[in-house]
């Protein structure tokens, strides 16, 4: 292992933006790094940890007052983090009447690929303090006066270009390394596993967290070694890896699965997920409240067909019906009720609601069920997975063709309607972020920005994450699961500082950098 310390270097120069168009590099380069640490983990693999930005006088703790959804609604119990200007002014007037000195502040949303920049809403804040304790005491007084709210640290508003940051960049030349980038999960899909445990078991050189996970299982399209193992969130962004990560592309994906039983062909609602629960929405077949992607929203459907493969583990049990199939698709059993084990090499098809009645009426033991899986990219072109194809659907997209290109609306990370709290908190404000990309020289980029560490590392908004990846020379880049899940680790341990109080979180899927035989990690 070679190691060197570098101080007071320009981040843009250090991180190889030579492949980025000059105009793009100028607008996307982060501030000059105050310090950076560069390690060579293996031939073609460097790990760079950057410290940049500074705390300034504008970085303070404050009490933020919640606003009601209705313009004339009560402030007690209000839940919106921001709202229309008129509502914010009404709140400020009532706060002043109770002896407070509120500030009404405008919140702007940046431009996204599918949404123009503009005013997201208005917030009401009270007090400016050097620590959270002062803001918490102010918030207690605000609550006692009949308002709801929370404390905020202003450096995490997502619009401070010079906020303190700690960013960790793993840049990988797979041709020089001779290894590959692989997806990994625990012994079964239904279950979570820590990244450090996966690295230790696999002998990987390094790794990063992967997809969202719900009900202890990956959420979104998951193709591994050419096998479709997870349902698509229709139209959401994902990363397609082939040849062990030597080919990486970011696109939007859909996947439709049908099953033919005798003369009937019907749609399969999902693969390897709990029937009736469609996390992030974006499903098929009448899901409520929407079939469009909605991040962190649980859509429902009482009537579903869901296929389970051996990778899932023990399928859920409950009311409904199911067919048990061998490796050739032949039905070995039709059951009234759900929960049969998946045969080795086979599958089960679970049904609930009206779909259960269809299955019991149509499917018979000895019948061969034929499944058809169709994956399409954002242009509607068919994607035919080969044995070395991996697709992880996470999102949103960050960079396409070397330019910032965030599909925030299409990816479901922008909400419609009067309550823009989710858009504000998740998309605009700073949070820990994990990203994957490829630079102009074909090198992989696995990146984590620490967050929720006031005065140390604030994190990034989605737009900031995209601009960071451009500054690193990314030609294509995708946002991975973030928040408490953001973790980058090597065989020697965790590189970043996970934001959960308990430390490293167990994950649904991870991405592992596996060296060629005989190479050791550090």
Image: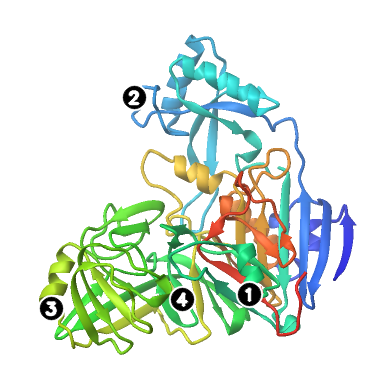
Quarter-of-image position of residue 374: bottom left
Disc with the residue nearer the chain's start (1 vs 2): 2
Disc with the residue nearer the chain's start (2 vs 3): 2
Front residue of 367/77: it is: 367
**Residue denoted by label 3:** 362
Regarding residue 211, the answer to whether it shows in the image is yes
- Residue drawn at (43%, 20%) of the image: 90
**Residue denoted by label 1:** 202
Quarter-of-image position of residue 449: bottom right
Q: Is residue 366 left or right of residue 152?
A: left
Q: CA distance from mark 1 to mark 3?
A: 44 Å
- Residue drawn at (72%, 61%) of the image: 493
Is disc 1 surrounded by few (<14), some (14 to 19) or many (20+) residues within 10 Å? Answer: few
Is disc 2 surrounded by few (<14), some (14 to 19) or many (20+) residues within 10 Å? Answer: few
Disc with the residue nearer the chain's start (1 vs 3): 1
**Residue denoted by label 4:** 223
């Amino acid at each position: 292992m070679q190691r060197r310390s570098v101080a007071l270097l320009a981040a843009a120069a250090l991180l190889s933006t030579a492949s980025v168009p000059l105009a793009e590099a100028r607008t996307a380069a982060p501030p000059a790094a105050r310090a950076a640490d560069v390690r060579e983990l293996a031939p073609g693999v460097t790990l760079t940890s950057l410290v940049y930005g500074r705390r300034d006088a504008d970085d303070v703790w404050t009490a933020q007052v919640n606003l009601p959804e209705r313009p004339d609604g009560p402030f007690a119990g209000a839940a919106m983090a921001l709202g229309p200007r008129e509502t914010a002014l009404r709140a400020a007037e009532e706060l002043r009447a109770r002896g407070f000195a509120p500030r009404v502040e405008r919140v702007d949303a940046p431009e996204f690929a599918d949404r123009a920049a503009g005013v997201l809403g208005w917030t009401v804040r009270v007090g400016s303090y050097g620590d959270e304790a002062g803001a918490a005491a102010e918030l207690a007084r605000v609550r006692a006066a009949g308002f709801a709210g929370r404390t905020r640290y202003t450096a995490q508003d997502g619009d401070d270009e010079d906020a303190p940051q700690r960013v960790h960049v793993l840049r990988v030349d797979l041709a020089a390394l001779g290894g590959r980038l692989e997806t990994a999960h625990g012994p079964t899909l239904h279950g979570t596993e820590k990244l450090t445990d996966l690295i230790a078991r696999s002998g990987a050189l390094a790794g990063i967290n992967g997809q969202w996970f719900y009900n202890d299982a990956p959420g979104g399209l998951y193709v591994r070694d050419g096998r479709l193992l997870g349902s698509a969130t229709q139209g959401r962004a994902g990363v397609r890896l082939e040849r062990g990560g030597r080919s990486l592309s970011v696109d939007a994906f859909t996947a439709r699965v049908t099953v033919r039983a005798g003369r009937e062909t019907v749609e399969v609602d999902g693969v390897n997920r709990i029937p009736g629960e469609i996390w992030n929405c974006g499903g098929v077949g009448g899901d409520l409240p929407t079939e469009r992607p909605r991040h962190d929203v649980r859509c429902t459907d009482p009537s579903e067909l869901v296929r389970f493969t051996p990778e899932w583990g023990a399928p859920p049990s409950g009311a409904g019906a199911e067919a048990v199939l061998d490796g050739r698709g032949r039905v070995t059993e039709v059951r009234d009720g759900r929960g049969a084990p998946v045969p080795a090499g086979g599958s089960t098809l679970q049904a609930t609601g009206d779909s259960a009645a269809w299955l019991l009426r149509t499917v018979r033991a000895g019948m061969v069920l034929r499944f058809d899986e169709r994956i399409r990219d954002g242009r509607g072109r068919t994607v035919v997975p080969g044995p070395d194809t991996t697709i992880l659907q996470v999102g949103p997209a960050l960079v396409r063709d070397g330019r910032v290109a965030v599909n925030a609306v299409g990816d479901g990370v922008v909400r419609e309607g009067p309550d823009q709290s989710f858009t504000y908190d998740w998309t605009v404000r700073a949070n820990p972020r994990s990203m994957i990309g490829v630079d102009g020289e074909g090198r992989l980029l696995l990146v984590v920005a620490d967050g929720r560490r006031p005065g140390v590392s604030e994190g990034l908004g989605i737009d900031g994450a995209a601009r960071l990846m451009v500054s690193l020379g990314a030609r294509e880049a995708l946002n991975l699961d973030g928040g408490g899940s953001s973790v980058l680790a090597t065989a020697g341990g965790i590189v970043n500082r996970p934001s959960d109080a308990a430390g490293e979180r167990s994950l649904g899927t991870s991405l592992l950098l596996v060296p060629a035989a005989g190479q050791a990690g550090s």
